[in-house]
Image (cartoon, grey):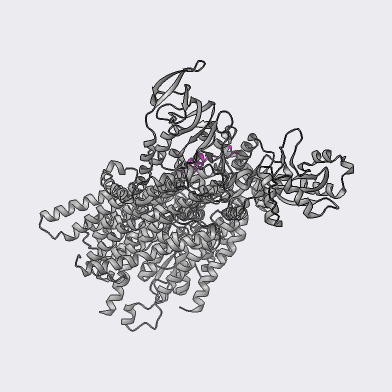
Amino acid sequence: MTSAVTAKPHGALLGRAGPQGALLRRAALDSFVKLDPRRLTGNPVILATEVVAVLATASFVDAALRHAPVSFALQIALWLWATVLFANFAESVAEGRGKAAADSLRAARVTTKAKLLTDPEKGVIALVASHELVPGQIILVESGDVIPADGEIIEGVASVNESAITGESAPVIRESGGDRSAVTGGTTIVSDWLRIRVTSGPGTSFLDRMIAMVEGANRRKTPNEIALAVLLAGLTLVFMVAVVSLLGLGKYSGVKLDPIILGALFVCLIPTTIGGLLSAVGIAGMDRLLKVNVLATSGRAVEAAGDVDTLLLDKTGTITFGNRMATEVVAAPGVPEERALMAAVMASIADDTAEGRSILELAREQHGLVVPVPAKFTAIPFSATTRLSGLDSDGVQWRKGAVDAIYRLVGLTPSEVPREVLATVERISRSGGTPLACAQDGKLVGVIHLKDVVKPGVKERFADLRRMGLRTVMITGDNPVTAATIASEAGVDDFLAEATPEDKLRLIREEQKKGRLVAMCGDGSNDAPALAQADVGVAMQTGTQAAREAGNMVDLDSDPTKLIEIVEVGKQLLITRGALTTFSIANDVAKYFAIIPAMFVVSLPALSAINIMGLANPHSAILSAVIFNALVIVALIPLALRGVKYRAIGAGPLLSQNLLIYGLGGVIAPFIGIKAIDLLIHAINLA
Amino acid sequence: MNIEGWAEIVLTIGLAVGLGWPLGIYMARVWQGERTWLDPVLGPVERAYNALVGLKPDKGQGWLAYTLSLLAFSAASFLFLYAILRLQGHLPLNPQGFAGMAPDLAFNTAISFVTNTNWQFYSGESAASHFSQMAGFTVQNFASAAAAIAVAAAMARAFAANRGETLGNFWTDLFRISFYILLPLSVAIGLCLAALGVPQVLLAHVDAHTIEGAKQSIALGPVASQEAIKMLGTNGGGFFNANSAHPFENPNPLSNLIEMVSMNVLAFACVVAFGRVTGLRREARALVVVMTLMVTAAAGAIYWAETQPTPALMAAHVHAIPNMEGKEVRFGAAATAVFAAMTTGASCGAINGWHESFTPVGGGVAMFMIQLAEMLPGGVGSGLYGMIVMALVAVFVAGLMVGRTPEYLGKKIEAREMKLAMLAVLILTASILLFAAAAAVLPVALKTVSASGPHGLSEILYAYTSATGNNGSAFGGLGSNSYWNVTMAIAMWLGRFGYVVPVLAIAGGLVVKPKLEPTAGTLPTHGTLFVSLLIGVILILGGLQYFPAQALGPIVEHFQMLAVTKS
């Protein structure tokens, strides 16, 4: 049980990505392969850029053949090609990181010999290749074997090393029945043996799905990405109209328009920045999830994570430590406090459970009481019939246990129990805690208060979530009294007590009916319907096969607090997309002030008045705008991959902050950038 | 410029917003079919109308049925008006004995009035009979305005509904808006104008003997009744060619004020009504603020430009006299500037000055107001839905930056909405720029353009801008021929239906969506931040579309004008 709420990413899958240099080299090569226009059909903005690049090249060749000056046309053409290549490069880098991770996963998918039980009754074994297994067959795996296929354990208990998938090298226990009965092909069994019913056919195993997801092979455009692509295509058409209309309007005004300049204007206006980085942003979002060891089965799920309104969190493990802990010892009337504490500690020394240890810890931490383990003692273990435990040492009997069991032990009927003790027991029960009584030599000496302890930092985390606009609902099997106490301590917005899987499902449906998106995590088979119903369902890697298939994400660390990270990654993805779009459109203002005067100034000298940047000459002005337009894509690749930082400060402040940076910044930055490039290319005499 | 001028601008616009408020509250009741104080009078009429057309007012229409009803109504209106104009020579109430209009002119004029544009290639007092003016133009002034307000009402229902099905009933909306809103207001304003001296007679003209002894024939007619709805319904088609600069249409400063307030008041009222119907009053208020700020800024810009002495006047050493070129002398520069801003911001198109004779900056701002898609505050109804389209784009782009997929007023904005919104934007841009580019090079079009150089380009650009924006005001200087008649008619048609159909399709998509409750993570769509965002998006998107074209027209003309004096 990890004590911190924040998940510690192992970065296992990304760690496998290999050296950075090789990745970039491969991406650079790949960006040339992607020049194939058939591969650009999904990206109208970059496709349009490529078309203009081809036309510019043709215009350069034409000029060269006529022995006309070619330097300008050549430079424009080259920078237009560079624009396309930079956009391709951005996508390739993003894809490359996934591909490298996929390659190492593929290494785990080796073909092995499987021990097929042709007659399970008699234990007859046939050796077959792992890829020949079909669902329904029963196989045997023994210590040292690689598990040849995904399956459900039908018999046996074994420890399994799943590092091939999770990157976590400590083996985990897998056993038949219950929620830990699923095994994954490609993992290794470290001890004992298992009989497994195969559940996946060739090519459809969990490992195969993981490879496909990581590689982005199944990456379809997400709904918001499609809508954004529509907007970008619409803007491209609008700018095409604006540029085409200049043919007529310019002719009327007696302006001689060079087609290459019109092309340059068009490329500068269309949103190449976001168009070039859009798919990289999407892939990088999946990548960031991978970094926290979460696999999403679709980009859609990542996007939905940003939209989640309601978070269903299991109490145990997410909000509280799994076990109850001692928080106080109340002495019976007439008993000194130290004696009561001593009794509680002595009765727990031989108790190896988390509850027992928490009593020793309470004594040590809060009262400075450290009791040495007696040299000789007889442990009295807990049993379901006595419902108490303790030890005998030096002729003294120390006991602790359920309150009525101790009453019986000390020979008191409830009416004979001191009123103060009854009141304490009542108070503890009412607050959602569990009272334990302790006795010394058959005499009641005190009451121990055991309670569910909320993990440190949880409350602050939920306050963050509230600022993000998320409602948290705690799910627990506890009774409403206990649940309410924990809920108010943890600061969740709502709770569902005595929850059954059906209650969970109903709650999700109700929330969705109100138009809210719901996220939850789960591991058991009975979680599967709720996982499937939730908009974001995170299944634990350790969970059952059914749960893993029902969810749209799998957490390889099996850490339920991961939900919070997942929501943040989703939001970050959307923010990055919006920031780059805003920046891209805002950039156009400066480009107009560079290109429009340059285009018209020869015929209409009065327009030099709007050359407010004071660019050296028409050619250098246009070239500077085109170069800026290309370089800004490269400059923003790191941002696209890393994502814009998300801060839980509420929508209003967040928007004004991002508008200032990417909107206003997007208007101002190109004025500076274009001017700087103009100074440079004028200085080295390029135009 | 002086403080009185600025006060006039602020007070006029303030009055339009202020009166729009109670009117909007009333309008919301009309949209929702609730009881109003006019029920005792109009209730029986409405029941008779429902019985006559076999209408069950509760039976809502899906977006397609609603759209088809609107298109069918508009088509019928077009045919009706076209027939009147062609046949006016044989129709009654034709004291001047005008012959029927030529086919291309009648085509242009009929589309012009059906699309709420009221572009006039004819001159009212010398081409249209009283019957054409009353049964043709005035009826369409009501009908086209009511149809646009109906679309706004449908949009409001789309945002109000939670997984709804229908957008309301077009025929019910058309009746209720015409009879409960437009008609009583027009009667009231018509009476006011008549009291202020606007003629309302069926005489053709009176003869007058001038001091010089010459005989002058002064045109008359049923002006007041048409004037009221011309302004209220943001139609803008004048009875006389000189429009609201004619003393019979606009006799004095008070009538000028009434007309200015009338042409913006219903646009503001539509937004207020939208806020009531959707229950999103703060959000509606933000839209009102955007409209108010931008139309005020435009009026200020025109006022500034029109009170600067031009270099030519300076050179002639007459700069002590205010630059009254193109302004209505009776009202002064400020009243002309605010009229120009309100009429171009509102797709009205009435004028009390001559936009062509403004300085390049003044004329350019007026043109830019129309190019910003007529929503500041926009035409009746069209201002609201134009603003909603812009808000959808603004929220889509910037809304992602709060880390959620975009939503506006509780409705998710997805690919379908973006597709339709961009289609609407593209149709306007393409119609304005491509028609203008074609006319700029085609000899047949250039033949009737009076000016040359950048000013001529402004004439062309303004014409297609005005037609596509369904504004109807003319920069001037254009003569009509069949090329202009037909292309302008197409531009008007595209500007109206190329926008309304995508808008209704958007409404149809939104109405079925669940209405989401706002959370702390939802982008706030009220308040200063959103207002600045929306203004920024409107200006940047509009600027990006039209900057190159404007650079070759008003902008270069402005700098050339300055350069002339320097040399």
| Quadrant (top left, top right, bottom left, bottom right) of the C terminus of chain B | bottom left
Instruction: Please tell me whether residue A440 is drawn above or below residue B319 in the rendered image.
Output: above
Vertical placement of B52 versus B35: above or below? above
Snapshot quadrant of residue A600: bottom left
Q: Judge whether residue A83 is colored magenta.
A: no
- Residue A621, image x and y in percent? 26, 65
| Start-end of magenta stretch | B54-75
Quarter of the image that includes the N terminus of chain B: bottom left
Is-magenta flag for residue B70? yes
Query: What residue is shown at x 50% (from left), y 27% (from top)?
Result: A193
User: What residue do we see at 37% from left, 82% from top?
Assistant: B319
Q: Is residue B428 left or right of residue B67?
A: left
Q: Is residue B208 above or below residue A374?
A: below
Judge from the rendering whether residue A533 lies leftward or rightward of residue A244; answer left or right.
right
Residue B229 falls left or right of residue B47:
left
| Residue sitting nearer the eye, A311 or A396 | A396
* Residue B449: quarter of image: bottom left
Q: Which residue, as the protein is rendered here, is positioned at the far right? A: A416
